[in-house]
Amino acid sequence: MNMKLMINGKEYEMKFGIGFIKKLDQIYPASMNGVEFGMGIEQSMFYFKTKNPTVLFNVIKAATDHLNSKPSNNDIEDELEKIASDGQLNGLFETLEDEMRESVFLKQKIEDFEEKAKVQ
């Protein structure tokens, strides 16, 4: 099941699969000893926990990247501003995080991340 989100009056299907992970890894790169690798899921989960609204924008961009007709950056920002003005931002944080947890590709990775975060 894929989530649908209304942005600027248009419904967009969001997918949380391999393409989503690849896009998040491009958005949140890391480097160690000169080797670059993606930390998209880990970084986005940290930003979800700290309620950083930029993660909402980035997750929406990554989850709609598979579409031929994608929402524009301005449309996403405007929609997020409307949601925030309506006091619904926390609900969107929860919904997107829940949807990510349901993905067969993300479920174990998110659980592992949270387990490691508890230890540190």
Image (cartoon, grey):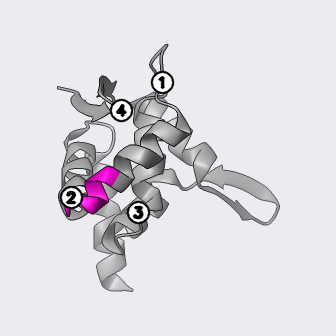
In which image quadrant can residue 1 be found? top left
Disc 2 secondary structure class: loop
Local crowd at mark 1 within 10 Å, few (<14), some, or many (≥20)?
Answer: some
* Mark 1 and mark 2: Cα distance apart in space: 24 Å
In magenta, the rendered stretch is 82-88
Of the two numbered discs 2 and 3 in the rendering, the one whose residue sits closer to the viewer: 2
Q: Amino acid at mark 3?
A: Pro
Quadrant of res 20:
top left
The percent coordinates of residue 17 (x first, y second) are: 37, 31
Disc 2 marks a residue whose amino acid type is Asp
Q: Secondary structure at mark 1?
A: loop
> Is residue 10 placed above or below 91 in the rendered structure?
above
Could you tell me the amino acid type at mark 4?
Asn
Please tell me whether mark 4 sits on a helix, a strand or a loop: loop
Q: Please tell me the numbered disc located at residue 86.
A: 2
Q: Secondary structure at mark 3?
A: loop
* Residue receiving disc 3: 53
Tell me the residue that label 4 is attached to: 8
